[in-house]
Image: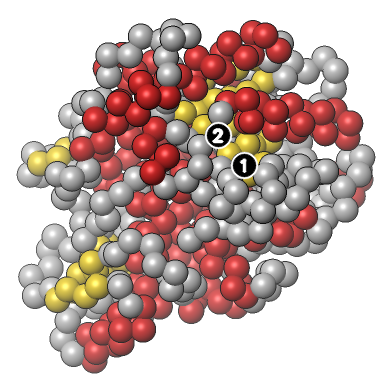
Amino acid sequence: MVWHLIRSNYNYSQPDLAQVPVPRAVSSLLRDIRSNWDISPNSIYGHIRDVPLYMDEALNIVHEHQHPQTCDDQNYLLSFGYNSGFGSEIHVEGYGLAVAMEVGRVYLSAAHVDSRREWQSPTSLCLDYTSAKPVNALGCYYEAWSNCSSHSKSWIARTVSSKSESVLLDAMVRSDNGSDRVVKLQLSSHPPHQRLIPRQLRHLADLLPVPDNLKYYWWRAISAAYLSRLNKMSKAMLATNRIPRHQHNSSKCVAMYVRHGDKWKEMKLHGFDEYANAAQSLWIDALRLGYVNANDIPTIILGTETPHVLVDAVDWGRTHGWNVVYNRVLLQIFREKGVVLSSSLSFNDSVELDQSKHDPMEYFSMIANLADLMQCDMFVCTLESNYCRLLDELRVAIGGRENSPFVDLSPETCSNPPCGLSTGADITSFSW
């Protein structure tokens, strides 16, 4: 994302604490978001000096737009929802939020459960107690997008599609000139035209020292952080479903999400050894620069949806003297799928899991993984994966880790993987 470009031009040397700027005051909104995710912004790498990203300011502008003083005189854009994976759903909904803000409408979520989203299998926790009907994951685990609601609106809603941004915005303008108080948005997949930054935030985006065509990724981080504000229920669930802090050395760890599963259909997959090599290089760099010392135990916090990756990682850690920890919710999900963890597991075994039944905790496990991974100060992932991009966005927008090293292994986004190491190539693309 844009912070990768800023960081690649940053002059790295032995850390000089005297030159680290005093942090600016943090808004109550960002403090609450961090509290619910249980994330501290205190990175061992500090922050990029003299290059503010204005994310706190932007989050507050979005929140103010979505929380008007009165709802009776507002116009609304109601999302139909988007049938996709964990990360891409949040990214596409972020585009819907940009459209709503651009045309001055409050963005609302359709809380119904889409039967196509089987992997988001609702739990007894995800119920609308006014109707006893299940709500989708976005309505279950996160704060409401707005203090307004479409349930009490009796106006007839017209439907528009996001397949063409210019046509869509024209349709929004016509709706505003007419009597369409509620317009439903049918979100398409990720066409290349979805690069809209809402007009209320362009003055902040203009301050970023990166090319204009890449500033949309800054907005994507803002929208992801806003839409994924955990609610009190999720905060309570995290408290009992997190990797215990005593299992890893504070933030001196390498966060690693190994995206396999059905992703082979969309991108090149990488064996665990490639991730491990990148983690070792990051740790050697951190030792050389004094961010960790010889007494620190090298640690990987691992996230994956694939059983054989977990087996490979634990075996590798034992052999190489690394502490490899992971969220125990993963074991519950694997058991539900009938998996017995052993060295005989193969990639083909993991592919077959995609057709098996889904555990009610499957969606929440992705939240728990993000919360665990964001604790670290070093990252290895594949930016061609939406989930990895989401991790990259949230670790900066919420975790304040824009200056922490992030290694990308995707040839789709990195011309010569691995990218992001002090001696390697830079990330050249951020996919769609």
Front residue of 187 and 64: 187
Residue 132 lies in quadrant: top left
Disc 1/disc 2 C-alpha distance (Å):
8 Å
Using the image, tell me which numbered label, if any, was put on residue 409: 1
Residue that appears at 89% across and 40% down? 15
State yes or no: discs 1 and 2 in contact (Cβ < 8 Å): yes
Residue at point 24%, 89% (across, down): 174
Q: Residue at x 23, y 26 (%)?
A: 356
Crowd tier of the residue under label 1, counting other residues whose Cα lies within 10 Å: few below 14, some 14–19, many 20 or above = many
Q: Is residue 200 left or right of residue 341?
A: right
Mark nearer the N terminus (1 vs 2) = 2
Mark yes or no: residue 27 visible.
no
SS type, badge 2: loop
Q: Is residue 207 left or right of residue 128?
A: right
Per the image, the residue denoted by label 2 is 270
Residue 147 — which label?
A: none
Res 134 quadrant in image? top left
Query: Could you say where residue 269 lies in the image, as x and y percent from the top left?
Result: 51, 37
Residue 184 appears at what percent x and percent y?
20, 69
- Does any portion of residue 285 appear in the rendered image? yes
Q: Give the camera-side residue of 295 and 271.
A: 271
Asked if 245 appears above or below 168 in the picture, the reply is above
Looking at the rendering, in which quadrant would you find the N terminus?
bottom right
**What amino acid is labelled 1 in the image?**
Leu
Residue 396, image x and y in percent?
61, 49
Q: How many marks?
A: 2
- Residue 305 in the image, given as x and y percentages of width and height: 41, 28
Establish if 327 lies above or below 127.
above
Q: Amino acid at mark 2?
A: His
What residue sits 47% from the left and 35% below the top? 259
